[in-house]
Amino acid sequence: MAYILSLDEGTTSARAALYDREARRVAMRAAATVSHFPQPGWVEQDALQIWNAQLSAMKETLAAGGVTPGEVAAIGITNQRETTVVWDRATGVPVAPAIVWQCRRTAPRCRELADQAALITERTGLVVDAYFSGTKIAWILDNVAGARSKAANGDLLFGNIDTWLIWQLTGGKVHATDPTNASRTMLMNLATGEWDSDMLRILNVPRAMLPRVAASSGILGVTDAAVFGTETPIAGIAGDQQAALAGQACFTKGLSKNTYGTGCFALLHTGGGVPVSKNKLLGTRAASADASAQFAVEGSIFVAGAAVQWLRDKLGIVTSAPETEAIAESIPSTGGVYMVPAFVGLGSPHWDADARAQISGMTLGTGRAEIVRATLESMAYQTRELIEAMEADSGASLRELRVDGGAASNNFLMQFQADVLDTPVVRPADTETTALGAALLAGLATGYWGSVEEVQSFWRADRRFEPAMAASERDGLWAGWKDAVRRVRSTC
Ligand code: ADP
């Protein structure tokens, strides 16, 4: 019996999952990854801790499935995107903490780039923002003694987490990424899929430290037997959101999904044409099942489920994320309370790095339940902002929203999402679409599965949430949200 092993390195945990021929998940294990917040707006992780967490999740998953490394036909990798690791080629030791995608430390540098914003968007599809890897790489080179000259000599390597894990798994033999991850660096030419010389010059990043851009679905190397136990092909790579798009069986133009994880990310597949957003969405690469270039538009929200973690870890008003569902349902409404979770600024469609979170509309009657409910509702409101921008870009309205990610298991949130969008929300039977997507890409590359049509046939709905809110109520709530967002904006 052969299986596909998927490694899914997210912001909060490193997971591994095994899939059989019908793409059924036969085992999955997770190990926590740790974030550090050394200054307001800064977010760091230890790349070696990430690798160790991934390794233990991988070993535990194989053990739980009763599967030996020799029974793994291929490995797929998916990862938190943009998070930036720079390490020494000779020793394999990172030269600085990994700068996590949420980190705002390069916001001042991005402000300096404002006069080149049009060129940067035209080349990369991205909005100039600290979110992307390019300014994070430059920050490390400028703040670690001797790093810039070493990088220029090729003695330091850059990678997002996919590249870091591939390098570790192959015993330092392969330094590669895929177009979906590369399209988040602000260094890749979105149209050609190659590193863009002008972007390297503008952001001052040496080409010598960059990985090779390989296909999302294709064998790019084999594991080192000393690390994995056997030489097994690594055959699927995609950033987490593009992997989720694949895992939701969205391989063709017009299909879309929204993932509710640490952040919230809506992607609409736009086929083979380079997308140009007029509404501050991002143009990005979709994971292609063949050699063709495939694209998507994306709306990115920095803090979604992370606000629930904040309720748990900083406010201490919940002990677990799932508990929020019953707490929110214990009251009929927030009574006018809104939480705008701009803890690290606002992403799409506002792109306001200096906005900060606020809870507004509180009275003496406001308590824990109102704040919890407002936090969940903020994910739905932020998603509506993305969907409205996508609809304005495409001129078409969404027929249904396919959802996944940790917080998609929250039934209150999913019903509120359908209500506030006035659109049905569909949750698949397997909400671990990120891990599944990477597995599908690896299985397609190695002939484990024969065609995109075959893997699309695996997708099953679990539950459909139909909109049930009166238009007047929806409009009133939406007006209140827009007002709350205006309050947190740093400009206008
Ligand atoms: P990531 O891949 O970004 O690490 P996940 O998809 O695993 O994230 O989702 C975890 C996030 O979802 C956490 O931020 C957590 O607070 C939130 N979350 C998980 N379960 C629930 C739930 N039942 N209700 C609300 N939020 C939840």
Image: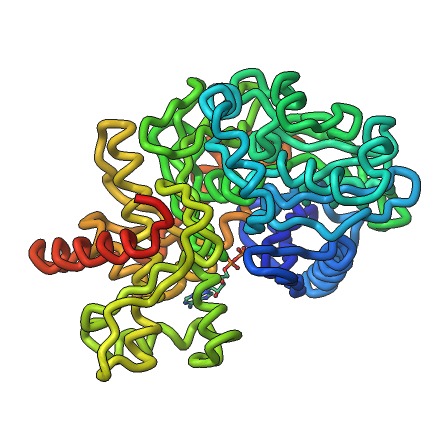
Examine the rendering and report whether any part of residue 443 can be seen.
Answer: no
x then y, percent, for residue 90: 92, 39
At 73% from the left and 26% from the top, the residue drawn is 212
Q: Quadrant of residue 473?
A: bottom left
Counting from the top left corner in percent of width and height, residue 430 is at 46, 54
Q: Is residue 324 left or right of residue 471?
A: right
Q: Position of residue 83 (x, y in %)?
A: 63, 45
Is 321 placed above or below 458 here?
A: below
Quarter occupied by the C terminus: top left
Would residue 257 be found to the left or right of residue 139 on screen? left
Residue 419 pos. (x, y %): 20, 56
234 or 488, nearer to the observer: 488
* Residue drawn 40% across the image and 23% down it: 275
Is 173 rendered above or below residue 123?
below
Left or right? Give the position of 479 relative to 24.
left
Q: Is residue 429 above or below residue 82?
A: below
Position of residue 220 relative to residue 226, above or below, is above
Towards the viewer: 93 or 171: 93
Q: Residue 326 is drawn in which quadrant? A: bottom left
Residue 1 visible to the viewer: yes
